[in-house]
Image: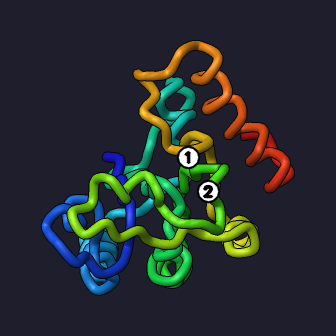
Amino acid sequence: PVLMYHRVGDAHNDWERNYCVSPERFAAQMKTLKTGGWNAIGLDTFVAWLDSKLELPQRSFLLTFDDGFLGVHEHAAPILRALGWPATVFLVSALIGKRDSWCEAHNPSGATYPLMDAGQIRELQGQGFRFESHTRSHADLPTLDNDALREELAGSRADLEDLLGNRI
């Protein structure tokens, strides 16, 4: 299984509840998985399994977070660190240290939430978190022409390689 989260924090309306889990609920979910004998694996291990290069231990799962919300740093990382579990975060590269501006038009309240900054990302990288490319601006990819699509995808990868110093 792949568990994919977005924001770990408090939800303030029904729309936000679709994309958000409270810190307490996230902690309870991780504790339940651990108690049930489950263990998170890293993205490299997952990809090797997809390529039929290795077998996964029973009760393995991949843990990912979309967008790079600050709650990953504040709430999820301490829990995962205590469990010794890896996670992968897919970052919106042009909005690092900013807010989820793409939600402004979708969230009924108009609320937006902070995304991790470069220092927080590097801190988590040092703790074993893996970071990959989501897009550059969280654009609606199917609506883009080829040049804009290339800019969103290749541009995000280049941004993150510059920031993190490794291949994305």
133 above or below 64? above
Residue bearing the label numbered 1: 43
9 above or below 56? below
Residue bearing the label numbered 2: 95
Looking at the image, which residue is at 58% across and 23% down? Answer: 149
- Decide: few, some or many residues near mark 2? Use Cα within 10 Å; few <14, some 14-19, many ≥20: many
Q: What secondary structure is marked by label 2?
A: helix
Display colour scheme: rainbow
* Residue farthest toward the top in the current orientation of the protein: 146
**What's the CA distance linking mark 1 and mark 2?**
23 Å
Type of residue at label 1? Answer: Leu
Where is residue 66 drawn, in percent x and y? Answer: 45, 53
* Residue farthest toward the left in the current orientation of the protein: 14
Q: What secondary structure is marked by label 1?
A: helix
Where is residue 57 drawn, in percent x and y? Answer: 42, 49
**Between 130 and 110, which is closer to the camera in this rendering?**
110
Looking at the image, which residue is at 43% across and 52% down? Answer: 102
Type of residue at label 2? Answer: Leu
- Decide: few, some or many residues near mark 1? Use Cα within 10 Å; few <14, some 14-19, many ≥20: many
Disc 1 and disc 2 in contact, CB within 8 angstroms = no
